[in-house]
Amino acid sequence: MTVSFENFPIYKKVISFTVKVFKILDNENLQKEFSLKDQLKRATLSISNNIAEGSEYGSNKQFIRFLWIAKGSCAEVRNMLFVLHSLEKINDEIFNTLNNECLEITKEIYHFIKYLEKSTLDAK
């Protein structure tokens, strides 16, 4: 793969999302939620980490595998957002904003996977 992961629009979007999540987690309402905050940070970072790592293997097949993992991390993030919202640790506005952005990232990763799968088939 000739494009560096930093240039993928989805990667840039995930980094922006990650910054938003980290800033939300500084809220004093979440100060005692150590393990949940830590897990949410790790899952959020996992999205961009898997995009970066997968892109470096030089194989669409490997990259696709890592993109599926990134997509799974999106589901984990959304689940934790639901938990925080259910516990009333984040309000409706924060929940809706982050959940919708995460859903959009999930869709874009899926479309990127489908694009790479088609590119792989077309190259044969």
Image (tube, grey):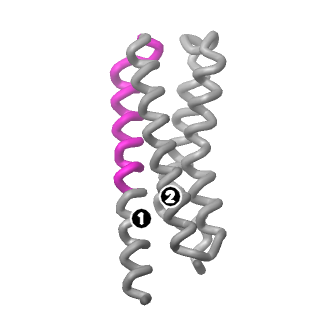
State the image coordinates of residue 3 (x, y, percent, origin top left). 57, 75
- Secondary element under disc 2, as helix, strand or loop, is helix
Label 1 – label 2 distance at C-alpha: 7 Å
Screen quadrant of the N terminus: bottom right
Residue at 46% across / 49% down in the picture? 71
The magenta span reads: 88-108
Q: Residues within 10 Å of mark 1 (few under 14, many from 20)?
A: many
State the image coordinates of residue 96 (x, y, percent, origin top left). 34, 30
Specify whether 73 is left or right of 104: right
Q: Amino acid at mark 2?
A: Leu
Residue at 58% across / 21% down in the picture? 36
Q: Residue furthest bottom?
A: 124
Q: Which mark is residue 67?
A: 2
Q: Quadrant of residue 59?
A: bottom right
State the image coordinates of residue 121 (x, y, percent, origin top left). 39, 82
Q: Is residue 98 magenta?
A: yes
